[in-house]
Image: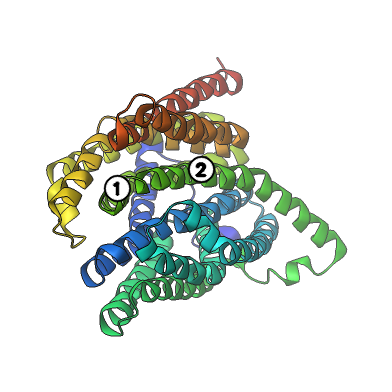
Amino acid sequence: MSASADHTSSLLEGSAPKRLAAFSAPLIAANLLQYIYQFVDMGIVGNVVGEAGLVAVSNASAIVFIISSIAIGLMSGCTVAVGNRVGAHDEQGQRRAFAASLGVALLGAAALTLVGCAFAKPIFTLMGVPGASLAQTVAYLEVVSLGTVGLFLLNAACAFLRAQGNSTDPLAIMAFSAAANVILDLILIAGAGLGVVGAAIATVTAQGAGAVFALWLAQHRYASARSVLRSTSDARERREAVAAARDILRVGVPMAVQQAVINLSYVLVTAWLNSYGPTIAAASGVGLKISTVAGLPCWGVGQAVSAAVSQNIGAGKPERAVAFAKAGCLMAIAVTVSIQVAVQLGAGWLVSLFGDSNRELIDAAVLYLRITCSVNGIFYAAMYALDSFALASGAPKLALANSLIDALAMRAGLAWLLSAPLGLGFVGIYAAQATAPVLPATIGFIYLQLWTRRNLPR
């Protein structure tokens, strides 16, 4: 069976804005569902366990989000490597790239399992997690670390599907995983009384089940996802697979580092906010969860841009690659701003979903949303779309440099300046997070203009 006979959806023809809208809509929904894992954990823990459990999940989630983002970033190399070969109609090349992606996923999962289990307690001690929540926080991360293999394989299979132009199957996979996670949360936290540990078990079990479903779907839909082990049975094929792995790592490592650095800055911010006491720590954790959900749609658009641009560059169509980048920016901005308006209108109600009636906590969380879910959404959305174009067009190091600017210079550095020397306290930390994406978005726009001039005929 050839690739063309499979469920591949070509992004090489038709209106770029219309194709991107149709392709990205399921990816946006899939990202929202994937994030439900942690969102539901916090909501149920907050209602059942209380403030101590909420602080534990809030702090643990900051590290877990780094692990998840590394998996997504590393597997973005699969999307680009396979997408290039889809555009070139190279089925065997797709098979090699997928085999290499699975190998990279297993190695990445093993490394993060070791790191997470070994450094859980030192990390949260350094973060200043309140004593009443420390043991629960450590236990949550240890359980999630032991289950990272499911997370990595899930993202590898979904990256392969996206590279084929398939965004509906990743949505079905995430819907399945999200439903499993919610059911297990209710059983293990509310029913069995396992509290924070129950939330972690629910998460890794749902991700593992999702990984099995995703790998089955990829093999069922596409000939290039079958016989991946046999595809590397002879020396020449193994050399080709190693070359494919290098392609994946060339893109995936900078993206994984980018995601790690960005989310590490959130960990630093969380640690600073812990110093203002458990109420501000819990409020900021709630605010971060909600604001992250508001920003998730632009992640889905960015994933769509990466797949579309990689297919078109592989097919030798740079003008369509640029068209997808521009359409992605406009779409990401429109969707993100719409959601942020809704967050502003319903901030108090959203915070109340986490189950704490402490007035000071609610007010602090609402203030967080007022500051971090505002006009900065325009730059945040543009940054992700433009970085995705840079990733797929052969400049992953630019995306990495942008992440360093966003995370270290802007979010962490400015947070320290505003909160301590300028005396704005936790409000200064909130303001720094809102300002962080402005400069990276500007740099990404300049790169798009330069790439267009170099690669499009005048």
| Circle 1 crowding by C-alpha within 10 Å: few under 14, some 14–19, many from 20 | many
Q: Do labels 1 and 2 touch, CB within 8 Å?
A: no
- Residue 394 seen in this snapshot: no
The circle drawn on residue 306 is 2
Three-letter amino acid code at the position of disc 1: Ser
Residue 109 in percent (x, y) is at 60, 64
The circle drawn on residue 413 is none
The circle drawn on residue 284 is 1
Residue at 57% from the left image edge and 36% from the top image edge? 400
Residue 279 in percent (x, y) is at 25, 52
Outermost residue toward the top in this view: 458
Task: Tell me if residue 214 comes above or below residue 340 in the rendering.
Answer: below
Element under disc 1 = helix
| Circle 2 crowding by C-alpha within 10 Å: few under 14, some 14–19, many from 20 | many
Query: Which of the pair 140/70 is nearer the observer?
Result: 140
Residue 73 in percent (x, y) is at 54, 49
Q: Quadrant of the N terminus?
A: bottom right
Residue 292 in percent (x, y) is at 33, 47
Query: Which of the pair 305/457 is nearer the observer?
Result: 305
Element under disc 2 = helix
Task: Tell me if residue 168 comes above or below residue 449 in the rendering.
Answer: below
